Structures are given as C-alpha cells and as structure tokens.
Amino acid sequence: MVLLKNEGNTLPLKKPHKMAIFGSHTRTAVADPNMQFSVMSSGPTYDGHLATDSGTGQGSLSYLITPEMELNRKASQDGTMLRWVANDTYSSSSGYGLVMQGSKSTSVTSAISSYAENMDVCIVFINALAGEGTDRAELYNTGQDALIKEVADNCANTAVVINTVGARLVDHLLGQESGNSIVDVLYGDVNPSGRLIYTIAKNESDYDVDICNTHNCNFAEGYYIDHQHFDAYNVTPRYEFGYVLSYTNFTSSHLNIDAPSSISHYPTGKLSVDGYEDLWDVVVNVSVKVRNTGSVDGADIPQIYIGYPEAARQPVRQLRGLDNVEVKSGQQQEVKFELRRRDISHWDVEAPNWAVEPGTYQVYVGASSRDLRLHSSFSIKNQS
C-alpha cells in the first residue's frame, strides 16, 4: 500500500468525531466479486469495491471485507459519527428533500456537499478497472474527479483512496481482507511501506508511449519506458517509480561496495536451460545501514540502482535490487545486496551474449528512482 500525499498530517486518523466516506468503491457490488465482471459494471471503473483482477487473473474470494464494513466497525468502537454516500455520482434536484412528518426540522438534502460539510475528515474511495483483454483508454475519469473535487471543496481534511491495477493512498488489489488492510493503514495500526511500481507524470504528454489499440504495436521507445524515459530526458514526474511516504522517517548511511577488479567479458560457465551457469554467480556485494529516525516502528524498502559505462548504451539507471526491512523507532539495521554477473551485464546483440562492459559502474541506493541518498562506484577491467 502506497501513501502518496499527506498534507497537514491528515493521516493517520485519530478517532475523528465526525467522518464521511464517499464512492461506490466503499461497498460491495450488486453481485459478489467472483461473478463475471460484466454483471456488475462496464467501462473504466468498477461499481463496487475492487479487490481482485478480471479475466484469468481474477481471484476466487470466499468473502470480502469492504472499507465501509470495517469503517463502521471502527466508528462503533471510537464513537465516531459516520456518514456515507456509496455512489460516485450522487446528486438531487434543488427543492426536494426529506422532512419528518409533523415537524419543522430542516430538510435533509441529498447532495455531496451536505454530507461533506462540517466533517472532521472525509475519505473518497475510487478505482480504475482494467484486465485481460480490456485496457483503459483514459488516464483519468471525469465522474470520479468531480466527486473528489466536490468533497474537497467542502471538507478541509479530505483523503483519497485509490484501487487500481490532502492525502492519497494507492492500494492496488488487496483481496478478500481489503477493507481491513486499508483501515489499518488509515488509522496508523500499520505503517504504509509499499512502493509505487510505475511513474505518475505531471502531464499526460510526459509519457512517451502512445495508446495502441491494435494487435501489432511498434515499440520504438526501446529501453526507455517508465522511469528510464523520465531519467533519460530529465522529465520531472509527479510521483516517481519507487516513491512512498511513511508515518515515520528513515535515513541511509555507510555505503560499502566489494567488487572484483576484473572479470571475463562474456560468461564462461556451463550452458544450461537458464543460460550460462556463471551468469547467476554473485560478483558484487553492497551493504548500507538504514536507521528509523521517526517516532513509530515501520518498514523501509531501500533500492539499489546501477548506472552502466557509456559504451554499454544502457538507460541512466536500472533497478537491480531491493529489500524490505522492519526497523523499530530509533534503531538501525544493515541491508545487504548481492549483485550477480547477470545484474551488471548487458545484451550484446552482435555476440550474441551477455557482456560485462569494462569501465566504471555507478551505484545508487535510495528510497526511489529519484530519491537517491547514497552514491558510489566501482571499476572493472576485462580479463584477457
């Protein structure tokens, strides 16, 4: 689960007195999630809580905990007044409301703004549906964008939870315990530690790959997709590959590299079904120390990126390893990365074989593809 934005420390929630939740993604759909998806929705969003993929990737759930179910349970424990609009486009005509018979009370207007006003916190749940044989043709959804804006305009503390293949929490597809997982992070029982597995651009035009709706597409971009494109052309993303926020803070230090001074240009091991056996030999060892400087326990995921010598004609940086390490508040742990021969090789088309280019290799360790906190290098010669 990835926390993207947390202005004013809206999250984690602290037993709010009044809370409102919005969107059809908060609840179950009209048919259970094991039914064919066309039964419940068509188009780029799913009319219900999206917890599994479609097509052959669709899971078979024995039950489904939705955010609405778990937030109701939490509200009953904390004494929170919970209001909800389980629809993405809920509205009414002016002048129509509900008035209790025989009373002079104010009518109850069925508008998003009336549910969002005077709340301590509002949470909007949205999703984006795609799957086998069904790609999305849009990077945004007008209806859901309007819902978020309407809520945020009327509620000072607004969080947005996004499921897709103030605060923004991206949780992808979480399965039958989805509601429990989301609420655990919203309330801080679990520290968010997932990483963004793609780059989110500032503008749609920043992406270098056009939508292709045919069976034959020309992948002219080569290596330069996602963060490798943004890095090569110095395009600043909104949220980069590997990005995350946390309820605590981590620092990295003591980058150490143990690398050989020389290595053969091509692998020399025995050829097997997985290629030359020595492609999988560990040739470079890297270690760093990660410290939790915040006030709560949490998990950090340090990432190691490699920059090749210019002659290899590779992207600026390539991810070559990561680790998930639990670190208690105020404590420190050592993280070790093992780079195999394959990790520092590139494909020589003319050979054709995996080649280790002689020269200087850059080593970066950080929290994302842009948040690179430690940097060093090592040089390798080819054995004659």
Image (tube, helix red, strand yellow):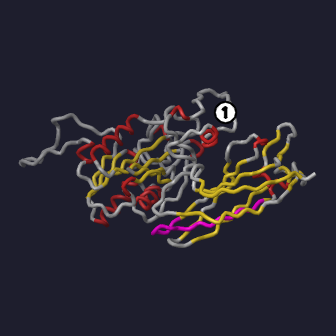
Q: Is residue 20 visible?
A: yes
Q: Is residue 127 above or below residue 364?
A: above
Q: For the stretch drawn in magenta, what is the main secondary structure? A: strand
State which region is magenta.
284-298
- In-image side of 283 versus 7 (left or right): right
Q: Residues within 10 Å of mark 1 (few under 14, many from 20)?
A: few
Give the total of numbered labels.
1
Residues 230 and 145: in front is 230
Residues 45 and 4: in front is 4
- In-image side of 65 versus 284 (left or right): left
Residue at figure coordinates x 50%, y 71% from the top left: 329
Q: Position of residue 270 (x, y in %)?
A: 90, 54
Q: Position of residue 182 (x, y in %)?
A: 44, 57
- In-image side of 336 versus 19 (left or right): right
- In-image side of 339 versus 301 (left or right): right
Q: Position of residue 285 (x, y in %)?
A: 74, 62
Residue at figure coordinates x 27%, y 52% from the top left: 83
Q: Is residue 282 visible?
A: no
Question: Dividing the picture into quarters, in which one does residue 367 lie?
Answer: bottom right
Which residue type carries mark 1?
A: Glu
Q: Position of residue 134 (x, y in %)?
A: 55, 35
Residue at figure coordinates x 67%, y 52% from the top left: 305
Q: Is 7 included in the stretch rendered in magenta?
A: no
Q: Secondary structure at mark 1?
A: loop
Tell which residue pokes out farthest to the right in this image. 384
Residues 122 and 66: in front is 122
Q: Which residue is mark 1?
A: 221
